[in-house]
Image (cartoon, rainbow, N blue to C red):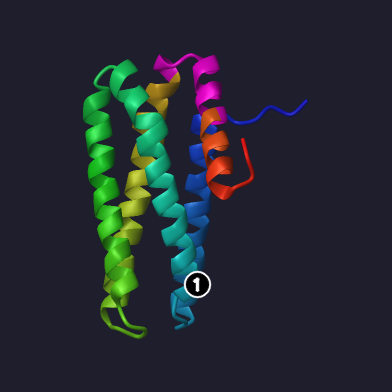
Amino acid sequence: MSRRPDILGEFTAEHRAVEELLVRIEAGRAEERAPGVLLDQLTDLLLSHCAAEEEHLFPVVQHDVPDGGAVVFRCIHDHLAIGQYLADLQALPSGDPALGILLNGLTELLRRHLATEEKQLFTAARKALPAAERAALGERLRADRAEIAGTGP
């Protein structure tokens, strides 16, 4: 019987997907192709991912993890900065010279943020939250996403 990932496993898998898209965007830029579709995919993934963390994980961490409020505050600050980068990138016309600068800034921020979440936030949550609670949070996350997608709980 295969076991479904807990909430931290779900979010870690999404982090790997973000990293994969960053690598693909960087490869496309090296070949002087506009990131277009990949940037749209990254935007969709990040907006969904950040919202899910803020809804499903951050309240529990803030309540149950020692110094959780401070950790969550830093993560939310990063999420706001990520959102601003994404909005700025989406507003640029194709071929705008600012694209490379913004992509570099977003990439740097994302890599630092993902590492911080995994090393600090996820580690603290893993220690403070029982496995059953993390599993239940993962199930709730999947059910909410299924409902949003219209595939039911």
Q: Residues within 10 Å of mark 1 (few under 14, many from 20)?
A: few
| Magenta span includes 136 | yes
Percent x, y of residue 65: 32, 18
* Magenta residues, start to end: 127-139
The residue beneath circle 1 is: 37
For image coordinates 41% across by 60% down, the residue present is: 43
Give the amino acid type for the residue marked by disc 1 in the picture.
Val
Kindly state the secondary structure of the residue where label 1 is placed: helix
**Residue 146 falls in which quadrant of the image?**
top right
Residue 76 shown left or right of residue 45 in the figure: left
Residue drawn 38% across the image and 35% down it: 55
- Measured as percent of width and height from the top left, residue 110 is found at 35, 52
Q: Which residue is at a point 33% across and 67% down the rendered structure image?
A: 103
Q: Residue furthest right?
A: 1
Q: Where residue 62 sits: x, y (%)?
A: 29, 24
User: Vertically, is 78 above or below 129?
Assistant: below
Q: Main secondary structure of the magenta part?
A: helix
Reply above or below: 78 against 33.
above
Residue 111, compared with residue 93, is above or below; it is above
Q: Position of residue 106 (x, y in %)?
A: 32, 60
Q: Quadrant of the C terminus?
A: top right
Residue that appears at 52% across and 48% down: 16
Q: As rendered, which of 91 and 69 lies closer to the eye?
A: 91
Q: Give the image quarter of residue 63.
A: top left
- Tell me the quadrant of the picture where the N terminus can be found: top right
Task: Examine the structure image and report whether residue 149 is included in the region drawn in magenta.
Answer: no
Front residue of 19 and 72: 72
Task: Classify residue 40 as left or right of residue 146.
Answer: left
